[in-house]
Amino acid sequence: MKSPETKKKAKTDMRKRRNPVAVFDSGVGGLSVLPELIGRMPREDFVFFGDAANAPYGERSAEEVRRLTDDAVSRLIANGAKAVVIACNTATSAAAGYLREKFPAVPIIGMEPALKPAAEAGDHPRVVVMATPLTIREEKLRALSDKLRDKADFVFVPCHGLVEAVERGEVEGDGTLSLVREILVPRLEGADSIVLGCTHYAHVRRVIAEVAGPGIMIFDGAGGTARETERRLSEADLLTDSEEKGGITLLSSSRDPDYSRIMEKLLARQVEK
Ligand code: DGL
């Protein structure tokens, strides 16, 4: 017979396994990662939080982004998240290491910009990396590109204004097309591929592909992050034991009454893809 202690532990473990996975971004960017997570782990419950009131993170200092990410992630964990996916390259660069030290018992998974698959997809390709100004300044991206220096040339493009357009739900149309043209066209000469180094940019992938034209491959880190999340949950024995399809809760800090509609629209568009 199981002792009351063992029974109690089994119950706690089950409750933990059935707790939600939190997905965090500065706004709607992480909604481009969420469908990959759901596709891999359809029985998990996901709670998404976009810190829209403080976006864009990419134009802030690393200290500010660390503080904002710490506030949001600490709240998500206090509310029962069994793991946290930081579905934001900027917040990953500024805060993932710090948060892993602060919460050693909680799997915290960050974004890895897809430089490696892009570098390995050709014979010393020229890879255009679109990212926020803060991600480009931070050590993480530098270290990764230094490691791959023998395999590819990297061109880093800070994309001012693009996150703001996506936050307004402007993921197609003339305004977004001219903004992407203005950002990309001067950097495209000789390019073999583009890395989307910010999760917001995946929402404008079609516009980016139109500006880039045929023959330029586009990479993002969503699939790799979803794979890594599943691996980390399994390693920690935290994958759900529920047989049912999981639920999705979308939350944000936005004060815009239209923001929930924008979130739902962008998520639906990504799922349709
Ligand atoms: N989505 C975030 C990223 O992946 C950044 C957006 C922002 O600047 O707030 O980098």
Image (tube, rainbow, N blue to C red):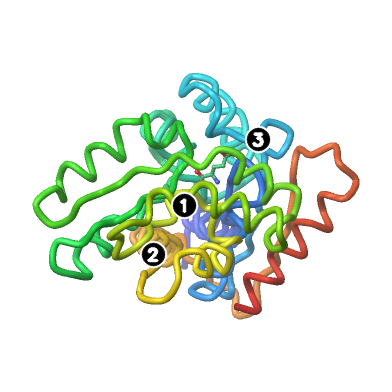
Foreground of the two, 231 or 160: 160
Q: Earlier in the sequence, mark 2 or mark 3?
A: 3
Which residue does the numbered mark 2 point to in the structure image?
A: 219
Task: Locate residue 21, reporting x and y percent.
Answer: 57, 55
Q: Residue at x 17, y 41 (%)?
A: 146
Considering only vertical position in the picture, is 95 above or below 245? above
What amino acid is found at the position of numbered circle 2 in the picture?
A: Phe
* Residue 178 x %, y %: 62, 54
Label 2 environment density (alpha carbons within 10 Å; few <14, some 14–19, many ≥20): many
According to the picture, the residue beneath numbered tag 1 turns out to be 184
* Label 1–label 2 contact, CB within 8 A: no
Residue 196 location (% of width, % of height) = 44, 56
Residue at 82% x, 49% y is: 259
Against 28, residue 78 (above or below) is above
Disc 3 residue: CB within 8 Å of ligand 1? yes
Q: What element carries label 2?
A: strand
* Amino acid on which the number 1 mark rests in the picture: Leu
Decide if residue 19 is on the left or right side of residue 219: right
Q: Are marks 2 and 3 in contact (CB under 8 Å)?
A: no
**Residue sitting nearer the eye, 90 or 252:** 90
Q: Name the residue under label 3.
A: 55
Depicted 84 relative to depicted 240: above or below? above
Q: For the point 60% across and 61% down, which residue is it?
A: 203
Task: Find numbered disc 3 in the image and state the secondary structure of the residue it sits on.
Answer: loop
83 vs 155, nearest the viewer? 155
